[in-house]
Image (cartoon, rainbow, N blue to C red):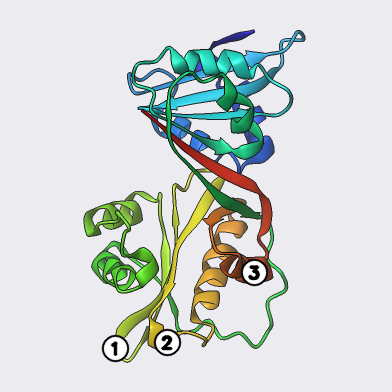
Amino acid sequence: MIRRLNESDHEVCFHLLKTRRAENLFIIGDIEAYGYDQEFQKLWGEFNESGELIAVLLKYEENYIPFAAELFNAEGFAEIMSNDPDFKMMSGLKAITEKIEPYLDKQLKRKRQTYYAKCTRLNTIKNDVDFSNVQQASPHDAEALVELLNSVPEFRDSIITVERKRRGLKDGTSRSFFIMEDGKMVSTASTAAENSLSAMVVGVATLENYKKKGNATKCMLKLCSHLLLEGKELCLFYDNPAAGAIYKRIGFEDIGFWMMYTYI
């Protein structure tokens, strides 16, 4: 049975979502921020014959994110999405979204697949790693952080702005660590979409002339150790297997692919 979820379902909903904290980063964060009954956000749940919640479908504006712990009614979720005139996007773990995709009757415009990795513990950190030059950013550092990212080719198409970066550092949905050399910020690593259970690592960048010195790795290690000590699981997207190898040395493990569908 599929039905709308409300505040009275919160405990059972989070009991399911917490089984895969990193995988459910966006659903957890959106529920904590906006709850169950907003015009732009709604949730549905599927219950099995024993009355246990086995799957959740989140609508946030025009985007839908499904999650299921076992076999679920993919056609039923697809029907909810197809009947929504605002529906334009679906994102989620490939193992789940690929079951819904065949039942959607809207025309597919674009489909993107990225690697999805998570970290629940760091690999052994050598005792001789010096973190004394790694600093945690404050909202006053937002402009320098954005300037650094815009100076790195991989991030030139990023939609991050100084205002958005500053707001994230203020409200706790983001944090950043960085390294200064020669009077300027040369390397950084950040989080985004932080919630009480998980966080996404983003914006790992180093200026070209300061690469191959271990700066990005030190920023990552400092950032991840802080979050893991708080009991949060970490996740990240990556396209480049070479970049994935660096993350895996730190302690990240692939957990599948994250899919992003855009419909006309």
Which of the 4 quarters of the picture holds residue 222?
bottom right
Which of the 4 quarters of the picture holds residue 123?
bottom right
Residue matched to label 2: 210
CA separation in Å, label 3 and label 1: 31 Å
Which quadrant is the C terminus positioned in?
A: top left
**Residue 169 at x, y percent in the picture:** 34, 56
Determine contact: label 2, label 1, CB under 8 Å. no
Q: Is residue 146 above or below residue 22?
A: below
Residue matched to label 3: 245
Q: Amino acid at mark 2?
A: Tyr
**Residue 246 at x, y percent in the picture:** 61, 71
Q: Residue at x 57, y 68 (%)?
A: 243
Q: Is residue 226 above or below residue 69?
A: below
Residue matched to label 1: 183
Which of the 4 quarters of the picture holds residue 127?
bottom right
Q: Nearer the viewer, mark 2 or mark 1?
A: 2
Q: Nearer the viewer, mark 3 or mark 2?
A: 3
